[in-house]
Amino acid sequence: MKYGMNAILVAVLAVTAGCVEVRDKEDTDPVKPMVQVNKISRMVVDGEMYLFNGAFLTRPELELELRKAPKIWPVEELEFHYKEVILKKNAVLYTMGHRVRLHIDRLESDGARIQTLPLEFKAGVGQAGRHGGHILLDVGTAKGSLRVQMLGQDGGQGRAGAAPDESMRGLAGEDGKVSLCAKAGEHFERASGKDGGKGHQGKSGSNGSPGGDSGTLEVMIQSGKEFQLEHYRNPGLGGNGGAGGKGGPGGIGGKAVGMAKPSDGSFMSCSFKATEGRPGLEGSAGINGQPGPPGALQSVCITRQKVIECI
């Protein structure tokens, strides 16, 4: 465990790390995960702590680690055994979407909170929301009050449609054709270049990414009739769809040609001058992506005095 300004971790008398094979009942993966087990005598927390790389870190320590780590970190299987845990009024333990087992002989909490994920941690563009993971809270004697919040992360926004390329340009306007100089409009129209065509519609944005599941919670309290436990669960929302891309450029206007005088000299000069065709209009924007689906609302099971309640 590490020390920080907002948290006090004291009297760590025995720390043991090892790996054992375990498997939760909700696991569907046939490969049994390896769990890192930590045995700690006493922990006192007054502030926010974040579970990362097998240890609870302060916010500055976490930010330092995140600068060295990839944007997406794997879900870990972690187990902690404590003789005593004291969570002061401002204490918050973030499990960060890992699968965590907290075995505590004696727990004292002054309205503290255990929460899966901080709300300010956002999924990146095109990334699925992180699941809440799993929290097992196995307490011998509990005193005070505690709130456990199982939250899935909102999915990331879809990617915007790609920028238009040359293949999305509208058709070029037809060039004018040589025509006699005359007062009549048909000759003028013939010699003038035609307008370019409208560009093709922009590329569609991708759909938003799915939100993370709320995660599963299992609490077992052997002793502590006056202990107040609140729990809340909410899956992550699906991400917004990506914006449609810009429409293709309009086609170039056709070129104009000069107007020839009649050979019989019936007109001394041309009254009209042929014009260039105008560029085509930009294509309409692409279609926005659809919102991603929300995560699943997962189970909570509370056991107190051998009475089990699951929702």
Image: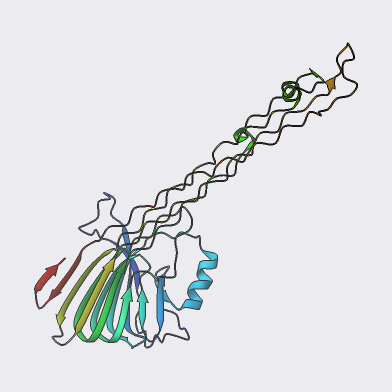
Please provide percent x and percent y for residue 123.
44, 60
Please provide percent x and percent y for residue 207.
42, 48
Taking the view exactly as shown, the residue that stands out farthest to the top is: 264
**Nearest to the observer: residue 147 or residue 221:** 147
Number of numbered callouts drawn: 0
Give the side of residue 145 with respect to residue 158, left or right.
left
**Nearest to the observer: residue 13 or residue 146:** 146
Quarter holding the C terminus? bottom left
Please provide percent x and percent y for residue 190.
73, 22
Within the image, what quadrant is residue 281 found in?
A: top right
**Nearest to the observer: residue 147 or residue 182:** 182
Give the side of residue 287 with respect to residue 42, left or right.
right
- At horizontal 37% and vertical 56% (from top left) the residue drawn is 238
Please provide percent x and percent y for residue 200.
57, 36
- At horizontal 31% and vertical 79% (from top left) the residue drawn is 113
Quarter holding the N terminus? bottom left
User: What colour scheme does the image use?
Assistant: rainbow
Vertical relation: 207 (above or below) 238:
above
